Image: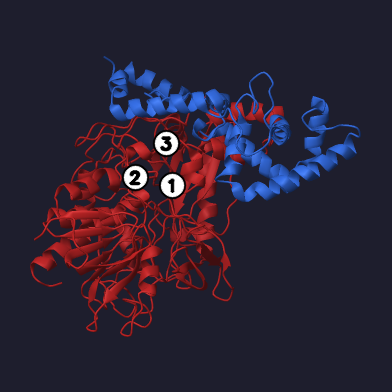
Chain colours: A blue, B red
Amino acid sequence: MSSVSLLALRPEIAAAQQHARQAAATSGTQLTYFDHAAAAEIEAIAAQIVPTDDTPGAREAGVIYFIDRALGSFFKENQEAYRKGLAELQAKRAAMFPGSSSVALLEPEQQLALVKAIDGTPFFEMVRAHTMIGFFNSPDQGGNRDYIGWKLLGMEHQMVFQPPFGFYDAQVSKVDSR
Amino acid sequence: MSRAPYRPDHPVDFIVIGSGAAGGAVAKELAVAGFEVVVLEQGPYLRGKDFKHDEVSTVFLNQLTNNPKRQPQTFRKTEAEKAKVQFSVGYGREVGGGTVHFTANWWRLHEIDFQERSRWGAVAGASLEDWPITYQDLEPYYTKSEQDIGVSGLSGSNPFDAPRSKPYPLPPLPVKSSGVLFDRGAKKLGLHSFPAPMAILSQQYKGRPGCVHCGFCMQFGCEVGAKSSSMAALIPVAERTGNCEIRAESYVRKIETDPNGRVTGAIYFDSAKREVFQRAKAVALCANGVESPRLLLISKSKRFPNGLANSSGMVGKNLMFDTGTQVSALFDHPLNEYKSVQVTRVLHDFYDSDPKRGFFGGGGIDARFLETPVQFGLEGLPGMPRWGSEWKKTAAHYYPRTMALFSHLTCLAVEQNSVSLDPDLKDEWGLPCLRVTFKNHLDDLKTMQFILDRQKEILEAAGAEKVWPMPIGEVTDSVHLMGTCRMGNDPKRFVVDRFHRAHDVPNLFIVDGSSMVTSGRQQPTCTIQALGYRAADYMTQAAKRGEI
């Protein structure tokens, strides 16, 4: 039996693996703080920050469920900033795209133009930060569904790794074992 | 002798305040020697199962560290300023203290660290002093600590190391790509990188498993107990003696004294914020380089109007900060630094001060993992797009291919740099908050620039495609907290004697980062723990002779 599987049998590793699997599978499926309309608006911005292109983005990673959970609990001091920021965003949207009804229903290029227009504002910086946290934090807090964020960075999530870890140490270990 | 748990009105032999690198060692040594010990720890008692790979709870919500919402702090650069609410000093706040989440770099001081003042002379504007002990005085305790907790390393691999009486108990951890590249760059420049001494088990040791290389290491607690924290390696030994009681969530608000000036115990808030007075024959204060002086300053009495053990006026003075620099670099192939421990190679070629450089100071350099995913998402690297498809492509390319060299540098002791009590602000328990006054000595900044240039050269020699030196400047926040109750023979200028006994109070011992006379080159945990072992040995002998 390899040393990896021996380690995997240790109860603390097994428990941690079980926990990680559970968190990944159950991360974010229900809103508890935002209503659906507000969530759709924030998700539309998050999806510009981490767009869905040839790899999945904020939408697929369920970032909105992280932000929703955070705003309802550990980041609740930001509730007012979201309320105010969203109201200003709607005013900006209405000014830039007369006749539109919501950010979520804008065309993708209009959404991009709107987000570019608010880039650098405190509201944008806050949503960007929360999007990044939701995309890259462990699924324990909602978000990063199926480790989509970590996969973008080339991270596998395992409780146990064995050397070699990367290209350069693998080169050295080849030389050593000759 | 009675057995734990103890009644508060039963005067135990020792109260140990704090359970980190020093407190854990002191508690374990005293308990093993047969004394009755009560450990009072501010933070909770967490176990391996409580640790998750979750940056939000660990880093943002302070699962393992002091929370500035509950215990705010104020900061100013000079005494002339009014301090503003600002976070500046971080520490581990749970059973095991900072050793639970630390990097686990385990560097001994060099022989010269104890005698820099006599070797190089005074430095204008700094309170540079010799230690009252030498490396040889501390060596047996460095060794005892390494053997007790389990440290991985390769003896003899650092040509600048001081002599050691025993090799490391465990072989080094496997080298990562960052270490291989560091070796490559160093070798080209004729420098001497070596396998990092780490307080992390490379193999099973004393019933604890070896590292599983999960990668969530610095800032996180170790689920398997391979990190040789006081929580994993020392506290369980102390508890198994039956003499040692760990009281977590016990926040000391005063060390009590009698009219003769002797300590009689400690008053603390329990988890329900009820006050408890635990009596004791002696107290070992190991609460860290900011909390120890704060508690002494709070523990005023008629006999000690300027704070306990403070007739010298030096309690809280000479605060030294974690001073260092960072250069990040991009390479062609994936390094996958997110796996395994933080550091696998270290370099001490620029450790000593050198008068030819025109300033006082030096540093050690280590090769390490850049940032955990959330921190990378938030900060990224200089010049990177900040969002959108271009950001995604860059992030995906950079993250697996980057590493950093960190430096750990001299921070000169300056008397005006201090911890004091904020006159206005109170914490959640109604206690005066920490007020930190800190501004680096000019030589610290020169050391930073000098070492930053060396880091760049090494990474370029290693073949980096891009090199990003991070801007240098005055340090305004820190985790290595040193110098605030320095040890020395002269009661007029130092707070504790060479055995950590307070000059003013015969049954009070203070041992932690506050005892350090100089900063070494940061990475003080190994020395803080060795001092703890040495102080405990002295306390044991003195108590047995009836001299406490």
Q: Answer few, some or many: residues within 10 Å of disc 3's Cα (few below 14, many 20 plus, some between 14 and 19).
A: some
Q: Earlier in the sequence, mark 1 or mark 2?
A: 2
Q: Answer few, some or many: residues within 10 Å of disc 2's Cα (few below 14, many 20 plus, some between 14 and 19).
A: some
Give the distance between the C-alpha atoms of the residues marked 1 and 2, in whole angstroms: 9 Å
Residue B487 lies, with reference to residue A61, above or below; the image says: below
Judged left or right of residue B76, residue A92 is right
Q: Given the image, on which type of amino acid does mark 3 rest? A: Lys
Residue B479 in percent (x, y) is at 44, 54
Q: Given the image, on which type of amino acid does mark 1 rest? A: Gln
Which mark is on residue B190?
none
On the question of residue B225 being in view, the answer is: yes
Residue at 72% over, 46% down: A83
Residue B300 in percent (x, y) is at 36, 78
Which mark is on residue B46?
2
As helix, strand or loop, the secondary structure at mark 1 comes to: loop
Q: Given the image, on which type of amino acid does mark 2 rest? A: Leu
In the rendered image, which residue does mark 3 sit on? B52
Q: Nearer the viewer, residue A41 or B91?
A: A41
Q: Tell whether label 2 touches label 1 (CB within 8 Å).
A: yes
Give the distance between the C-alpha atoms of the residues marked 1 and 3, in whole angstroms: 10 Å
Judged left or right of residue B482, residue B309 is left
Residue at 32% over, 43% down: B158
Residue at 40% over, 30% down: B214
On the question of residue B333 being in view, the answer is: no
In the rendered image, which residue does mark 1 sit on? B63
Q: Are marks 1 and 2 on the same chain?
A: yes
As helix, strand or loop, the secondary structure at mark 3 comes to: loop
Residue A63 lies, with reference to residue A127, above or below; the image says: above
Q: Nearer the viewer, residue B320 or A7?
A: A7
Residue B219 in percent (x, y) is at 44, 43
Label 3 is found on which chain of the structure?
B
